[in-house]
């Protein structure tokens, strides 16, 4: 009975502690492994990288957003500048003067011949009218140069002194050109003599120069422009409806 009681006591201890104690050296190895495992840093999840403001992905996202906003701002600025420039060009073009031809007069025509070649001497005068129809804008003209042709034959060129126009002002300018002993072919010589007798000379006038605008304290100057008066017939100029010239701005270097 005593042996049976001893066995029962051993079985009870085994049931209370089913795992027998490990040897000391195995216990130390297991403890060492646990310590080494606990020192290994855990892996970061994608969610943790996004939430962390100091993560590399988050910093890249911020740089991309910053660059995108810079590009949008520069594009918007350029669009605004383009729109403002387009509006300014439209205003300046509408503010150019109206130029009319009031009179064309040809005189002192002479065609000489030497060595079977013909030479032309002739004078042509043109009266121009500059109308500044702006309400509050003044106009300023400089470096005006005029070239005149009669029946497609170049008669000559001349310069016009600069002048200014207040708003609502009309200014009349006389342009006189002369050609002397200019070589001419037979066909053009005959046409010029015929038109001169008929007082119906067809004249082309081409003018270039600089125009400036002033409005209050704002001044814009040295804008190149050109004027074309094409096929003006000396015989068909009416004071109530004079031939009109075309004006055009060439560039905007003074803006």
Image (cartoon, rainbow, N blue to C red):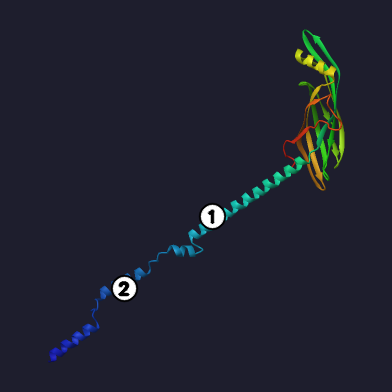
Is residue 129 in view from this perspective? yes
Q: Nearer the viewer, residue 24 or 42?
A: 42
Please rate how many residues cluster around mark 1, counting C-alpha atoms within 10 Å: few if below 14, some from 14 to 19, many from 20: few
Horizontal arrangement in the rendering, residue 111 relative to residue 23 (left or right):
right
Residue named by callout 2: 31
Residue named by callout 1: 64
Horizontal arrangement in the rendering, residue 73 relative to residue 113 (left or right):
left
Q: Secondary structure at mark 2?
A: helix
Is residue 162 in view from this perspective? no
For image coordinates 67% across by 49% down, the residue present is 80
Horizontal arrangement in the rendering, residue 159 relative to residue 89 (left or right):
right
Q: Quadrant of residue 18?
A: bottom left
Quadrant assignment for the N terminus: bottom left
Which circle, 2 or 1, is nearer the viewer?
1
Q: Nearer the viewer, residue 237 or 38?
A: 237
Residues at marks 2 and 1, CA–CA distance in whole angstroms: 49 Å
């Amino acid at each position: 009975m005593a042996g049976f009681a001893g066995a029962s006591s051993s079985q009870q201890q085994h049931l209370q502690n089913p795992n027998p104690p490990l040897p000391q050296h195995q216990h130390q190895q297991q403890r060492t492994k646990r310590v080494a495992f606990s020192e290994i840093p855990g892996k970061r999840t994608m969610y943790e990288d996004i939430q962390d403001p100091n993560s590399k992905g988050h910093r890249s996202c911020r740089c991309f957003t910053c660059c995108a906003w810079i590009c949008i701002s520069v594009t918007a600025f350029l669009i605004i500048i383009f729109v403002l420039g387009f509006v300014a060009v439209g205003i300046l073009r509408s503010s150019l003067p109206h130029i009319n031809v009031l009179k064309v007069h040809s005189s002192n025509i002479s065609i000489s011949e030497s060595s079977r070649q013909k030479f032309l001497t002739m004078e042509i005068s043109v009266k121009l009218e500059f109308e500044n129809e702006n309400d509050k804008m003044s106009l300023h003209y400089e470096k005006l140069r005029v070239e005149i042709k009669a029946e497609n034959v170049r008669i000559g060129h001349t310069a016009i002194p600069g002048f200014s126009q207040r708003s609502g002002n009309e200014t009349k300018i006389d342009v006189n050109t002369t050609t002397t002993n200019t070589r001419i072919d037979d066909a053009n010589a005959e046409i010029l003599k015929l038109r001169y007798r008929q007082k119906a000379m067809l004249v082309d006038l081409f003018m270039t120069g600089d125009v400036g605008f002033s409005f209050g304290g704002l001044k814009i100057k040295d804008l190149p422009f050109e004027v074309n008066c094409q096929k003006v017939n000396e015989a068909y100029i009416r004071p109530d409806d004079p031939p009109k010239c075309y004006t055009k701005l060439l560039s905007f270097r003074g803006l």
